[in-house]
């Protein structure tokens, strides 16, 4: 009886994993079809949609903008999260209300926030600027990044700071030479998470993002709300490839961190 | 100006605190200064928009009142969008948790390679943009797409299924897109499940149904409720999936908020704010329901 249950559970789990991953692979055959429309299976294989996308300056401009915004978001988010980490390290803990405030973005639908930000910031003329979008993305990325960084900082022995300070090191020196190297992997992981969430963000991009050259996700949305074409499938395939590389780097860093922790413990 | 000077005077104190640290009491202003940037960003992009929406929705030409809310229910499209939002989010959250729960239970009883592989698959699925996964469902479900081709090849149907632009398509897309997040949340919660108790129950003669009701469920209800709430909250804000996979009658509140806000300069802000506040109220109601489902935390009584 339990054996049957175990096998059934295994098969079911495998099916769930396939359901999770297969749809993402579906963009590949769709992007290589020779016809103007989607067809399955594709009759003649071609790379011309990829050529078309790569040679289209609009897509390239949007990709560049998305990249810049995501990188800035990753930087700003990680710096703010590290400041939380320092407070935790020096005081032992963060005030509960501050932690709850940081987690608020997880509890509110983004569309409500984006429309409120649009209405509130419209008179200031900031709507449509990159700065506002970066800050909005930062707010949305803060809960996960901060949780991750606080986890990394929790593994540092607070006495290290006192030791370094008693030897005459200045706070900036302590941070640079002792603290940040110890949490470097956590920093990298938090930056990747923030980058990913900003790269993906569509709601804020549609409400308050730049209009003439929209970010990649907003431009994609504008295209696919009109028609489904092999060119869109090609764009999706390229972005998916980039994402998978990011995910692999993240997994690699995580494995290294785990190995290092088990080394420290043993 | 005076405030700035006060803060500048605070700087040596902050520096002293950073170097000597432990000597200063935790209530000192220096430490809180480091928390300020992040909290300001959250205040500007989470607290301010919610409060401002509330203000806009209650403002009328003569003062304050519920006029905008009356208008909301007077136009047929808003109540319909409200119903659609509640329907999609409700069904998708239940479907997601029902699909994810057996797999997560299976994986949580394993350690090592199976657990790691499942986590990896979740990570990859989560990393791929929600918009791209929506687009790939558009491709899969379209008239000449993979799902139709497969169904005809296997002989389920002769006619094209024509799934795209229907409520079914929206629900399939939402469930699949929310599955990784729900699974992560469930796996995290299920770590606390004590598998010894289940073995103990069956060795004491409990039938599988009894064990499920008296041993499994009390331990699982909290993670299940958390996952339900997470999916519900996230899907109320997702207007992309209904907009891209659904038909004209499947509009949700988020889509109306976008079109009101960006196209209607006269009354748009007020209308969108009402939709926003109604969405928030719906999430609040879902929170209360999920708190009831979650019940009191379960503790093993013996031992410690």
Image (cartoon, coloured by chain):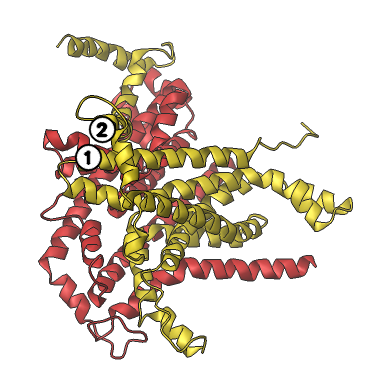
State which quadrant residue B302 falls in. Answer: top right
Q: Compare marks 1 and 2 and give the one earlier in the sequence.
A: 2
In this picture, residue B113 sits left or right of residue A29? right
- Mark 1 — residue? B269
* Label 1 secondary element: helix
Residue drawn at the location 57% of the way across and 69% of the way down: A14
- Chain ID, yellow in image: B
Q: Quick one: which chain is red?
A: A
What is the chain letter for disc 2? B
Q: Are marks 1 and 2 on the same chain?
A: yes
- Disc 1, disc 2: CB below 8 Å? yes
Chain letter of disc 1?
B
Where's residue B119, x and y in %?
52, 57
Residue that protrudes farthest toward the right in the picture: B205
The residue at the point 25 percent across, 49 percent down is B258
Q: Residue at x 76, y 68 (%)?
A: A3
- Measuring from the top left, give residue A42's x and y in whole percent: 32, 86
Asked if one can make out residue B114 in the rendered structure from this viewpoint, the answer is: yes
Q: Nearer the viewer, residue B201 or B48?
A: B48
Question: Where's residue A260, x and y in %?
Answer: 50, 46
Q: Residues within 10 Å of mark 2 (few under 14, many from 20)?
A: many
- Give the structural element (helix, strand or loop) at label 2: helix
Q: Residues within 10 Å of mark 1 (few under 14, many from 20)?
A: many
Q: Above or below — where is A200 with respect to B136? A: above
Name the quadrant containing residue A265: top right
Q: Position of residue B304 (x, y in %)?
A: 76, 31
Residue A9 lies left or right of residue A40; in this view the side is: right
Left or right of B71: which side holds A49? left
Residue B56's disc number:
2
* Viewer-nearest residue: A135 or B152: B152
Measure the alpha-carbon separation of dots 1 and 2.
Answer: 7 Å
Asked whether the viewer can see residue A70, the reply is: no
């Amino acid at each position: 009886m339990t054996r049957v249950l175990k096998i059934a559970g295994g098969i079911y789990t495998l099916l769930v994993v396939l359901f999770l991953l297969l749809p993402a692979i579906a963009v590949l055959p769709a992007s290589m079809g020779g016809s103007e429309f989607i067809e399955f299976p594709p009759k003649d294989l071609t790379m011309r949609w990829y050529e078309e996308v790569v040679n289209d300056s609009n897509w390239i401009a949007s990709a560049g903008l998305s990249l810049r915004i995501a990188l800035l978001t990753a930087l700003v988010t990680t710096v703010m999260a590290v400041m939380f980490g320092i407070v935790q390290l020096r005081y032992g803990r963060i005030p509960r209300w501050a932690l709850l405030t940081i987690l608020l973005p997880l509890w509110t639908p983004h569309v409500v926030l984006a429309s409120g930000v649009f209405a509130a910031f419209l008179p200031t003329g900031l709507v449509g600027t990159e700065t506002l979008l970066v800050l909005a993305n930062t707010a949305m990325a803060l809960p996960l990044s901060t949780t991750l960084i606080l986890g990394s900082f929790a593994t540092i022995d607070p006495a290290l700071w006192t030791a370094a300070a008693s030897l005459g090191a200045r706070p900036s020196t302590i941070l640079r030479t002792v603290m940040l190297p110890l949490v470097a992997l956590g920093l990298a992981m938090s930056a990747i998470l923030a980058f990913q969430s900003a790269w993906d963000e569509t709601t804020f991009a549609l409400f308050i993002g730049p209009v003439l050259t929209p970010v990649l996700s907003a431009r994609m949305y504008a295209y696919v709300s009109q028609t489904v074409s092999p060119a869109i499938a090609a764009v999706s395939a390229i972005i998916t490839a980039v994402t998978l590389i990011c995910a692999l780097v993240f997994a690699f860093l995580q494995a290294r961190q785990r190995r290092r922790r088990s080394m420290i413990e043993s | 100006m005076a405030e700035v000077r006060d803060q500048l005077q605070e700087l040596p104190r902050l520096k002293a605190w950073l170097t000597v640290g432990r000597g200063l009491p935790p209530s000192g202003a220096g430490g809180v200064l480091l928390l300020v940037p992040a909290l300001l960003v959250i205040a500007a992009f989470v607290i301010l928009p919610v409060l401002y929406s509330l203000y806009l929705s209650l403002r009328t030409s003569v003062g304050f009142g519920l006029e905008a809310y009356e208008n909301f229910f007077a136009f047929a499209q808003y109540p319909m969008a409200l119903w659609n939002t509640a329907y999609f989010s409700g069904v998708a959250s239940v479907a997601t948790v029902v699909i994810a729960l057996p797999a997560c239970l299976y994986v949580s009883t394993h350690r090592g390679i199976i657990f790691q592989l499942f986590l990896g698959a979740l990570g990859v699925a989560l990393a791929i943009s929600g918009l791209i996964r929506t687009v790939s469902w558009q491709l899969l479900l379209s008239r000449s797409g993979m799902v139709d081709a497969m169904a005809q090849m296997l002989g389920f149907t002769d006619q094209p299924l024509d799934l795209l632009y229907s409520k079914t398509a929206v629900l399939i897309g939402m469930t699949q897109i929310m599955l990784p997040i729900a699974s992560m949340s469930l796996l995290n919660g299920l770590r606390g499940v004590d598998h010894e108790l289940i073995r103990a129950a069956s060795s004491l003669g409990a039938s599988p149904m009894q064990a499920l009701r008296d041993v499994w469920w009390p331990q699982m209800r909290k993670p299940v409720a958390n996952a339900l709430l997470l999916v519900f909250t996230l899907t109320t804000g997702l207007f992309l999936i209904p907009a891209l996979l659904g038909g004209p009658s499947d509009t949700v509140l988020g889509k109306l908020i976008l079109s009101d806000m960006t196209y209607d300069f006269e009354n748009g802000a007020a209308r969108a704010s009402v939709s926003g506040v109604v969405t928030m109220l719906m999430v609040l109601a879902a929170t209360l329901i999920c708190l009831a489902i979650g019940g009191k935390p379960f503790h093993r009584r013996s031992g410690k």
